[in-house]
Image (spheres, rainbow, N blue to C red):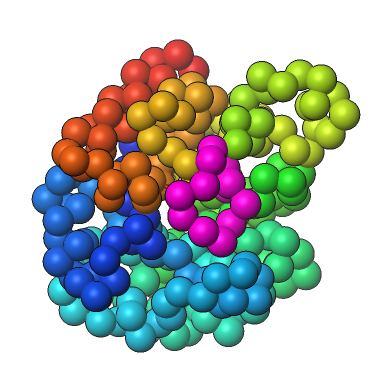
């Protein structure tokens, strides 16, 4: 298996007034990446941070900043995020059906790693051309909740076809992670939303290797234990696929 586990606490659940120390705290607890949720108040109904905050945080850490752009016009954000020091730049396919090639090229030319995200209701097939392109995305992020807010309930149908009847009615709204892992054994597949000790096994067994977790990590009395549990689940699951 070519993929490695990456545990990425979602800084959306951190104390934004102390972002640098929250970042250090998570890295000391064993986080691999820091997940940064960029929301424009238009693509999703919430407004968070932009490039200036990434630039400020970059002055305090060399960590991989895994930026998830929940914005209507991701192309406008590429240059500012590249200059600010973002590491990964993941845009949504729902906003970028017509210009994803240009986006990927731009992201790479600004020194970032391109990724594409899909919402729970989007057909997984929509990302195949981006994974198989001459200049491909290097990660697919499957949203396991509707994007916009932390603390939501995990949607099992995004990773696993437990709801067979529902799947038959609406195949696009179903087990994107499992389908992607079967098709692309070496692809980084990230899941985001509602992940924690009670849901991680479903996502890991379906094939996710990059795990974003906000409230379950920041809200835990021992965040290091949760990070370690998430990693163990991914590594154990990898032996099964
Ligand atoms: O992108 C998002 C929400 O849109 C996520 O990154 C959440 O912030 C994850 O938080 P939890 O669901 O783990 O609390």
Residue sitting at the far right: 169
Q: Nearer the viewer, residue 215 or 67?
A: 215
Q: Main secondary structure of the magenta part?
A: loop
Q: Position of residue 15 (x, y in %)?
A: 26, 66
Q: Position of residue 218 (x, y in %)?
A: 27, 50
Q: Is residue 76 visible?
A: yes
Q: Is residue 71 visible?
A: no
Q: Quadrant of the N terminus?
A: top left
Q: Nearer the viewer, residue 97 or 22?
A: 22
Q: Is residue 169 left or right of residue 239?
A: right
Q: Quadrant of residue 206?
A: top right
For the record, the magenta segment spans: 143-154
Q: Nearer the viewer, residue 69 or 78?
A: 69
Q: Is residue 138 left or right of residue 116?
A: left
Q: At 44% from the left edge and 38% from the top edge, which residue is drawn?
A: 195
Q: Nearer the viewer, residue 204 or 10?
A: 10
Residue 202 lies in the magenta-colored region: no
Q: At 25% from the left edge and 82% from the top edge, which residue is drawn?
A: 56
């Amino acid at each position: 298996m070519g993929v490695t586990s990456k545990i990425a606490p979602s800084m959306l659940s951190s104390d934004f007034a102390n972002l640098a120390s929250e970042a250090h705290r998570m890295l000391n607890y064993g986080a691999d990446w820091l997940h940064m949720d960029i929301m424009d108040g238009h693509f999703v109904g919430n407004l968070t941070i932009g490039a200036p905050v990434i630039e400020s945080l970059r002055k305090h850490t060399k960590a991989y900043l895994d930026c998830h752009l929940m914005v209507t016009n991701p192309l406008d954000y590429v240059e500012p995020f590249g200059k600010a020091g973002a590491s990964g730049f993941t845009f949504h396919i729902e906003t970028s059906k017509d210009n994803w090639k240009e986006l990927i090229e731009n992201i790479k030319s600004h020194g970032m790693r391109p990724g594409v995200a899909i919402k729970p209701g989007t057909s997984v097939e929509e990302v195949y051309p981006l994974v198989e392109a001459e200049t491909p995305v290097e990660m697919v992020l499957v949203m396991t909740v509707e994007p916009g807010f932390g603390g939501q309930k995990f949607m099992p149908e995004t990773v696993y076809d437990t709801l067979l009847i529902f799947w038959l009615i609406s195949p696009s709204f179903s087990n994107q992670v499992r389908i992607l892992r079967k098709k692309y054994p070496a692809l980084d597949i990230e899941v985001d939303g509602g992940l924690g000790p009670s849901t991680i096994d479903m996502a890991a067994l379906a094939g996710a290797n990059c795990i974003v977790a906000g409230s379950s990590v920041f809200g835990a009395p021992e965040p290091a234990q949760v990070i370690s549990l998430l990693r163990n689940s991914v590594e154990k699951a990898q032996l099964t696929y």
